[in-house]
Amino acid sequence: MWQPGDILAWRGIYRKRVWHAQTVLDLDLIINPDFSFEWKDVDDYNEGIERGVILNKWMQEIDKAKQEIFMKMEKREYPLDDSWLKWKPDVNWQQPKLPADWDKV
């Protein structure tokens, strides 16, 4: 089923910087195979709330998503069940190809 370190991540707006990209919202939920869990980046999330860069409507949506995922965990519903283990790609699908300049930005 789940592998140690599987992560559900909430991502927000990116700000482009000269040398890197910075997220305004970055909150991860790590779900272990036994369905125990831990939060990652909570301090950053709370700091974003305190500074006012994480909007109230974002927090409301994240809270809804948290409730939904915890309900799915409790009921072992997709994608937290084993149904994905039976998934197979359509045999008619063609292998995707990268464009010739895939390595140039």
Image (tube, rainbow, N blue to C red):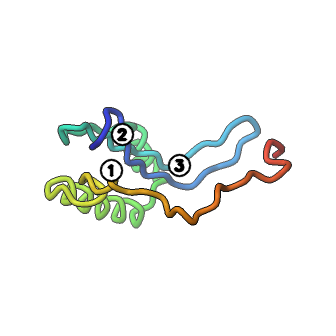
Where residue 13 appears, x then y in whole percent?
56, 55
Type of the residue with mark 1:
Leu
Q: Are marks 2 and 1 in contact (CB under 8 Å)?
A: no
Alpha carbon separation for disc pair 3 and 2: 22 Å
Type of the residue with mark 2:
Asp
Q: Which quadrant is home to the N terminus? A: top left
Type of the residue with mark 3:
Val
Q: Earlier in the sequence, mark 3 or mark 1?
A: 3
Where residue 70 appears, x then y in whole percent?
21, 55
Looking at the image, the residue that sits furthest to the front is 91
Disc 1 target residue: 85
Disc 2 target residue: 6
The secondary element bearing badge 2 is classed as: loop
Task: State which mark lies toward you, 3 or 2.
Answer: 2
Q: Which mark is residue 24?
A: 3
Who is closer to the viewer here, 43 or 35?
A: 35
Who is closer to the viewer here, 10 or 49?
A: 10
